[in-house]
Amino acid sequence: MKFILKIFLMGISSYLLPFYFPWWSIALGAGLVSLIIRGRNFNSFNAGFIAGGLVWFYLSFTIDNSTNSLLSEKIALLMNLTESIWLIYASTLIGALVTGFGALTGGLMGSIISPKKMSRNEYVS
């Protein structure tokens, strides 16, 4: 349940934050969500990757559709790509990785701030 909640909140922050801040603010939003809603670091990365990928694919595809692929076809021609959809895939991958690593950073920051308590029986050097 926390995983789905993380995906939802990271998706909302990834959609809204770039309207007011630079594009890389998606990493800050995902990190903050991952810091507040604690979990395993791998799950935080996966939630950020999924949320960022979905949002960036939606935004890239919507912008490309509304402009009838004018700019993306010209850029794809410059990059020797066969179709402009590969640019949408590339931007989706970049957005997903940035959001995923932002979420991972937030999860690791949370484990630094409040480490797990050790039992009295564990040896500490």
Image (cartoon, rainbow, N blue to C red):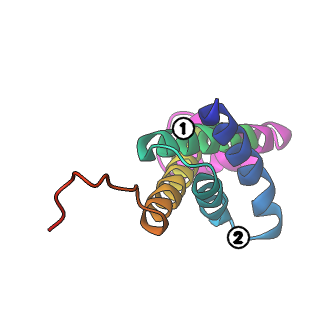
Q: Earlier in the sequence, mark 2 or mark 1?
A: 2
Residue in the image at 66% along x and 65% along y: 25
Q: Which amino acid does label 2 sit on?
A: Pro
Residue at the location (58% across, 37% down)?
50
Magenta stretch secondary structure, dominant: helix
Q: In this view, does 106 lie to the left or right of 72?
A: left
**Mark 1 residue element:** helix
- Which of the two residues, 84 or 53, is positioned nearer the viewer here? 53
Q: What residue type is labelled 1?
A: Trp
Q: Residue 1 carries which label?
A: none
Name the mark nearer the viewer: 2 or 1. 2
For the point 79% across and 39% down, the residue is 62
Of helix, strand and loop, which one carries label 2? loop
Badge 2: residue crowd in 10 Å (few <14, some 14–19, many ≥20): few
Identify the residue at horizontal 31%, vertical 52% (top origin).
119
Residue 63 figure quarter? top right
The residue carrying mark 1 is 86
Labels in figure, total: 2
Q: In which quadrant will I find the N terminus?
A: top right
Name the quadrant of the C terminus. Answer: bottom left
Side of 59 relative to 93 (left or right): right
Measured along the vertical axis of the image, is residue 87 above or below residue 24?
A: above
Rendered view: 89 above or below 97: above
**Along the line of sight, the residue nearer the viewer: 56 or 100:** 100
Q: Give the range drawn in magenta.
A: 61-87
Look at the picture and state if 102 lies above or below 42: below
Q: Looking at the image, which is closer to me, 94 or 61?
A: 94
Residue 54 belongs to the span the image colors magenta: no
* Residue 122 appears in the figure: yes
Marker disc for residue 22:
2
Image location (x, y in percent) of residue 45: 48, 45
Residue 91 on image: x %, y %: 58, 48
